[in-house]
Amino acid sequence: MASKKYPALLLFGYPGCGKGTQGVTLAGMPNLVHLAMGDIFRGLDKSSPIGQEFLSYSTKGQLVPDELTVRVWRNHVEAQVASGRIDPAYHVLILDGIPRTPAQVEHLTPLLDVLKIVHLKMQDTDRLVARLKGRAAKSNRPDDAKEEVIRNRIKVYEDETLPVLACYDKALVADIDADQPPLAVLRDICGALVPVVPAKI
């Protein structure tokens, strides 16, 4: 690939807005690959040097530094390319959970050709809290069901991740109403992506 960059779509939105659901659904398309940063972290070989480096932060409840986050992401993608699971000339990456800070944007800029940013917006934070409580109950994660924990996650997103959108050209951002039923959200996302995603089968 001449540009040496991975074509990518970025998923943004509050915790619980449906990013994972939509990302997995979109990845059913032949040339789209969903990469959720949380899954990548969980899939690390904890005995490897980079896995040990990750654990040195995560086991203390500390945020993983931006440089390490991008390095873990890059190692994962390069391994997927080497194994043939990702072909940069064919696949478009759907990134979920990265970049999360302006510093990560800076680290990723040489690596990504961002085709579109899907911003899943929810105006009703009370509804968002209820959705996250329900999800935590289904997943049997009682700590995640505490309202103060949920509202803190929402605040962290507003303080730390929302500013990332300002790092990109506004023309790249498609605001999608995530208060709709999932199929309606998917319809609107597809409407935003069809003009920019290469039509490969």
Image (cartoon, helix red, strand yellow):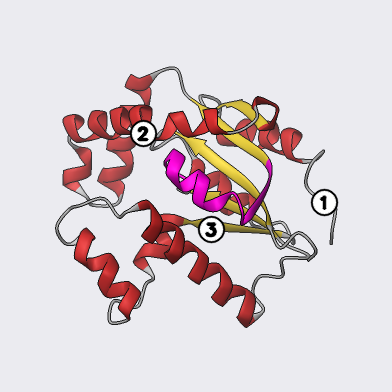
Q: Position of residue 61 (x, y in %)?
A: 17, 53
Q: Residue furthest top?
A: 123
What residue does disc 3 label? 35
Give the extent of the magenta segment.
Answer: 99-115
- Please name the amino acid that badge 1 sits on: Pro
Q: Position of residue 99 (x, y in %)?
A: 48, 46
Quadrant in which the C terminus appears: bottom right
Quadrant in which the N terminus appears: bottom right
Nearer the N terminus, badge 3 or badge 1? 3
Nearer the N terminus, badge 2 or badge 3? 3
Whether the magenta-drawn stretch holds residue 77 is answered as no
Q: Quadrant of residue 33?
A: bottom right
What residue does disc 1 label? 198
Q: Position of residue 114 (x, y in %)?
A: 67, 45
What residue does disc 2 label? 160
In this image, 169 relative to 102: left or right? right
Q: CA distance from mark 3 to mark 1?
A: 18 Å
Q: CA distance from mark 2 to mark 1?
A: 32 Å
- Please name the amino acid that badge 3 sits on: Leu
Q: In the rendered view, tell whether residue 186 sits above or below residue 71.
A: above
- Please name the amino acid that badge 2 sits on: Glu
Q: Position of residue 139 (x, y in %)?
A: 29, 52
